[in-house]
């Protein structure tokens, strides 16, 4: 008989309990809220840093040269005319 299955129920039935002392319970609750607030503030600063980096990068990049547009309705390019041949039914 294996020794391990006897204690396997403890692994799956574990749940951390709250402390019984009211002041310790309050202190741990406040510690959890403070940790949550710290993580939120840290995330906000990271997001603001990313936005600031993108704004600085956008404004320090050289502006692209704008090429004046061609006349309205004109297409620019090289074209060749392809003549349409009549379809024949003979095999010649």
Image: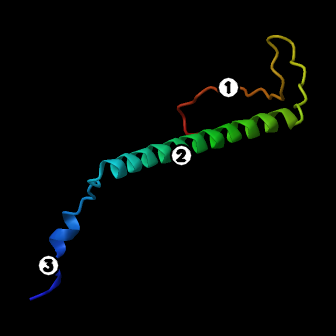
Point out the residue furthest to the bottom here.
1
Earlier in the chain: of badge 1 and badge 2, it is 2
Position in image of residue 91 (x %, y %): 55, 39
Front: mark 3 or 1: 3
Extreme residue toward the top, this view: 72
In the rendered image, residue 66, in percent from the top left (x then y), is placed at 89, 25
Residue density around tag 1, few if under 14, some if 14–19, many if 20 or more, within 10 Å: few
Query: In the drawing, does residue 7 fall left or right of residue 55?
Result: left
Say above or below: 4 vs 20.
Answer: below
Which residue is painted at 37% across and 45% down in the image? Answer: 26
- Residue in the image at 41% along x and 49% along y: 27
The color scheme shown is: rainbow
- Seen at 81% across and 36% down, the residue is 56
Give above or below for 19 relative to 11.
above
- Mark 3–mark 1 distance (CA, rounded to whole Å): 85 Å
Q: Which mark is residue 4?
A: none
First in residue order: circle 3 vs circle 2: 3
Q: Identify the disc placed on residue 39.
A: 2
Image quarter of residue 1: bottom left
- Disc 2 secondary structure class: helix
Number of other residues with Cα within 10 Å of mark 2, as a class: few under 14, some 14 to 19, many 20 or more: few
Residue at which label 1 appears: 84
Could you give the CA–CA distance between mark 3 and mark 2, rounded to whole angstroms?
Answer: 40 Å
N-terminal-most mark, 3 or 1: 3
Q: Position of residue 30 (x, y in %)?
A: 43, 44
Residue identifier under label 3: 5
The secondary element bearing badge 1 is classed as: loop
Pick the front one: 11 or 55: 11
In the picture, the quarter occupied by the C terminus is top right
**In the image, is 87 to the left or to the right of 22?**
right
Q: Is residue 36 left or right of residue 71?
A: left
């Amino acid at each position: 008989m294996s020794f391990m299955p006897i204690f396997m129920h403890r692994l799956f039935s574990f749940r951390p309990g709250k402390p019984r002392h009211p002041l310790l319970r309050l202190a741990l609750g406040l510690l959890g809220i403070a940790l949550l607030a710290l993580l939120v503030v840290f995330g906000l600063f990271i997001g603001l840093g990313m936005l600031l980096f993108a704004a600085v990068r956008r404004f320090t990049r050289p502006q692209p040269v704008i090429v004046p547009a061609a006349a309205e309705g004109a297409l620019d390019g090289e074209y060749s005319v392809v003549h349409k041949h009549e379809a024949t039914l003979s095999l010649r």
